[in-house]
Image (tube, rainbow, N blue to C red):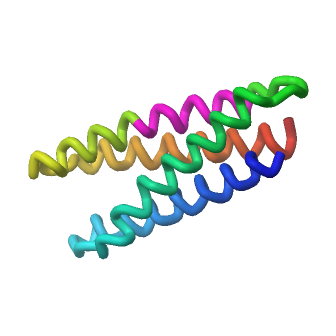
Amino acid sequence: MTSAIFGVATASAAVLIGLVLLGYRLTRKRPGALMGWLHPVLGGVSLGLLYWVTLTWHGPRSLPFDAGTLVLTLTLAGGGLLLALRLNRLPRPLLVILLHGGAALLGLALILVGLFLG
């Protein structure tokens, strides 16, 4: 249970930093390098912790928790696409950024429902 709480906390921090990065994108300002790197690092740490909880849980399965972890895995694919575009110095479409963030919010909400209500 402790790993799940830390996974949710790091995922929440990654989502919060992602929202700040979206604000920078909409105002056409450049964020600091620390914030730009902290977002994917926290996202990766949270996915690792959530995978650990999903694979080692011995109690009854929680469908919302598992579905939320799967949705956050899909956000990893979106983040990878955004990183590839950035490394190739190509523009990152706002639609892809919004889908990435929306999926992250949905995944986090599902995990919270599964953790505390399911």
Which of 16 and 58 lies nearest the eye of the viewer?
58
Which of 43 and 93 lies nearest the eye of the viewer?
43
The magenta segment: 64-76
Relative to 61, say whether 115 is above or below. Answer: below
Name the residue at 49% across, 47% down: 44
Is 29 situated left or right of 21 in this image?
left
Name the residue at 63% across, 46% down: 108
Let me know if residue 74 is in the magenta part.
yes
Relative to 110, say whether 101 is above or below. Answer: below
Measured as percent of width and height from the top left, residue 74 is found at 46, 32
Q: Residue furthest left?
A: 89
Is 14 situated left or right of 38 in this image?
right
Q: What quarter of the picture does the C terminus occupy?
A: top right
Measured as percent of width and height from the top left, residue 53 is found at 73, 36
Is 33 situated left or right of 68 in this image?
left
How many numbered badges does the structure rendering display? 0
Which of 24 and 3 lies nearest the eye of the viewer?
3
Is 46 situated left or right of 87 in this image?
right
Measured as percent of width and height from the top left, residue 32 is found at 30, 75
Magenta: main secondary structure equals: helix
Let me know if residue 3 is in the magenta part.
no
Name the residue at 51% across, 58% down: 14
Q: What quarter of the picture does the N terminus occupy?
A: top right
Name the residue at 21% across, 71% down: 28
Measured as percent of width and height from the top left, residue 88 is found at 10, 46
Relative to 15, say whether 98 is above or below. Answer: above
